[in-house]
């Protein structure tokens, strides 16, 4: 997996006009019949039209051993920039399109949009289907790959078939990425891909944010119908069928080397284990931990306040602290006239005892690595994410114009959620149509049973990282000494009058060198107190 920091954009312009609905179905060369008996909707069915998107580098994320051998024959290491080296079809055909957008702005016109974005209308135009097929043994789902970009268009006769198809195409396009993400979601990327500093740093971060056991992951799935009723039960069914589709592809890849990602040989593994519903939960926790967290640094803020007051005095130190903390800034420019969006507004009245400052010098943070031999094994410290996964530090963006302000009289939105250029990309394109579903756009590999960034019949949506203070820090009293324990018990705390144990969670990761990662053998145990 190669990664360079860049922007991944989904651009959507809603025109509000009806798309042309061409008669007939997509056809295979030679007029071969459709597999199964699941109907394929004509291009533009149920789509209000005017939607465009781009997701570089390309839809196809499979590079098998033969593909990798051909590439490295033309681009032998240590070369890294070989633009003419052969690549799998549809693996990078969106890269130049979106890259050229930089040189077209300002001055881009509506007529220029097809040069830099691809048509995101539902379906495939007549005679533009490159491949039409169904997973073996399933006649309740048909998959159409368009010839221009290789995007999968899934048509399900049943809800179960639709989800099965989404799992199948997810594995076709992103199996190795999905495998990396499910391991990263458990804090064990280093054990899967190698002990590089960046891989271990990712494990440390995930274990601090979401130190889940397998029982925890299973319980989150099992609670679906208990907590959300019929909607939760439907979600459980969707995940179960999605996982079945992934496993169908894995079964095929184990006997057909052309379907197995070549990266497995690079990390010294024969291929993936079977998928489980808990893998979907683990991947979701990783994505939520990266893009859905914000705040939670109240303790660091308190320590900053104390240090500032010690250095500058009580009043001036508080002023220095106030300038540095994240809070509402009345001098900040805003982009919407006569509108306010207060950020971390202060409550008018604080509850007595609701604000706690630690005693100076008393704070001791728990190290996520317990007795690690990893630093000596790698010879360097964990300084950030530079291994198999490297997430960007740039921000997402969006431009929205109301129908009243647009020339056409209809709303326009251009939305650019930022991830990074990956080969394969962490996101993937899907176009899905089944009972209760008409949507196209991007979704994260490993949780691709729903479109997360895209459009439905007559509306569009995007996403961005959470920046608000949504993580709170609480101070709780430790259990007081009693006759059997003469000192404060640091591993039990009072909760609703009960002395409650602090749960200790540990995970041991081990790694060995592989062609993809030459880090010396090492082991480290991750530690969390919950």
Image: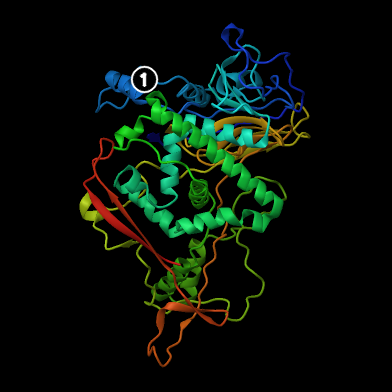
Q: Is residue 49 left or right of residue 393?
A: right
User: In this view of the protein, which residue sits in the foreground, 343 or 130?
Assistant: 130
Q: Total number of numbered labels?
A: 1
Measuring from the top left, give residue 456's x and y in whole percent: 69, 34
| Residue 8 in view of the camera | no
| Residue 404 in view of the camera | yes
Q: Quadrant of residue 225?
A: bottom right
Residue at the spot 72% in from the left edge and 25% down from the top edge = 49
The N terminus - image quarter: top left
**Residue at the bottom extreme, as displayed:** 483
Measuring from the top left, give residue 399's x and y in whole percent: 64, 37
Residue at the spot 61% in from the left edge and 49% down from the top edge = 333
Look at the picture and state if 474 lies above or below 45.
below
Q: How is the image coloured?
A: rainbow
Q: Secondary structure at mark 1?
A: loop
Q: Is residue 319 left or right of residue 255?
A: right
User: In this view of the protein, which residue sits in the foreground, 125 or 134?
Assistant: 134
User: In this view of the protein, which residue sits in the foreground, 66 or 296?
Assistant: 66
Measuring from the top left, give residue 475's x and y in whole percent: 50, 75
**Residue at the front extreme, as displayed:** 137
Q: Quadrant of residue 238?
A: top right
Q: Quadrant of residue 464?
A: top right
Q: Is residue 525 left or right of residue 320?
A: left
Measuring from the top left, give residue 231's x and y in whole percent: 69, 49
Look at the picture and state if 161 lies above or below 95.
below
**Residue where numbered disc 1 is placed:** 83
């Amino acid at each position: 997996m190669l990664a360079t920091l860049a922007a991944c954009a989904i651009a959507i312009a809603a025109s509000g006009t009806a798309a042309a609905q061409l008669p007939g179905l997509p056809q295979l060369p030679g007029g071969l019949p459709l597999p199964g008996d699941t109907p394929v909707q004509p291009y533009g069915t149920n789509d209000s039209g005017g939607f465009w998107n781009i997701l570089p580098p390309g839809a196809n994320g499979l590079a098998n051993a033969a593909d990798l051998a051909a590439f490295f024959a033309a681009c032998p290491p240590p070369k890294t920039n070989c633009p003419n080296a052969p690549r799998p079809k549809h693996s990078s055909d969106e890269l130049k399109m979106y890259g050229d957008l930089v040189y077209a702005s300002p001055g881009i016109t509506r007529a220029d949009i097809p040069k830099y974005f691809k048509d995101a209308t539902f379906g495939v135009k007549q005679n533009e289907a490159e491949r039409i097929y169904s997973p073996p043994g399933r006649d309740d789902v048909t998959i159409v790959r368009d010839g221009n970009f290789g995007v999968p268009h899934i048509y399900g006769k049943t809800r179960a078939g639709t989800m099965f198809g989404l799992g199948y195409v997810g594995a076709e396009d992103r199996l190795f990425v999905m495998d990396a993400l499910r391991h990263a979601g458990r804090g064990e990327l280093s054990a899967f891909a190698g002990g590089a500093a960046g891989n271990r740093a990712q494990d440390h971060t995930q274990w601090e944010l979401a130190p889940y056991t397998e029982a925890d992951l299973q319980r989150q799935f099992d609670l679906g119908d208990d907590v959300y009723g019929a909607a939760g039960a439907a979600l459980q069914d969707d995940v179960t069928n999605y996982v079945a589709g992934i496993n169908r592809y894995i079964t095929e890849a184990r006997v057909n080397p052309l379907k197995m990602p070549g990266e497995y040989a690079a990390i010294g593994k024969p291929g993936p284990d079977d998928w489980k519903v808990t893998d979907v939960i683990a991947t979701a926790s990783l994505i939520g931990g990266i893009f859905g967290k914000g705040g939670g640094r109240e303790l660091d803020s308190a320590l900053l306040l104390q240090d500032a007051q010690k250095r500058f005095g009580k009043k001036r130190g508080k002023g220095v602290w106030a300038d540095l903390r994240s809070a509402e800034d009345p001098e900040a420019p805003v982009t919407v006239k006569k509108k306010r969006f207060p950020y971390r507004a202060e409550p008018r009245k604080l509850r007595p005892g609701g604000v706690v400052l630690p005693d100076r010098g008393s704070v001791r943070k728990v190290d996520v690595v317990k007795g690690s031999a990893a630093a000596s094994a790698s010879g360097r410290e964990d300084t950030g994410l530079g291994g198999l996964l490297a997430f960007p530090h740039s921000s997402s963006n969006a431009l929205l114009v109301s129908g009243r302000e647009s020339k056409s009289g209809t709303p326009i939105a251009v939305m650019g959620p930022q991830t990074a250029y990956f080969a394969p990309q962490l996101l993937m394109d899907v176009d899905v149509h089944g009972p209760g579903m008409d949507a196209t756009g991007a979704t994260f590999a490993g949780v691709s049973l729903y479109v997360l960034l895209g459009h439905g019949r007559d509306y569009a949506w995007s996403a961005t990282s959470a920046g608000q203070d949504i993580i709170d820090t609480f101070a709780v009293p430790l259990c007081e000494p009693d006759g059997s324990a003469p000192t404060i018990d640091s591993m039990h705390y009072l909760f609703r009058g009960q002395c409650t144990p602090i749960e200790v969670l540990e995970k041991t990761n081990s790694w060995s060198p592989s062609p993809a990662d030459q880090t010396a053998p090492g082991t480290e145990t991750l530690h969390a107190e919950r």
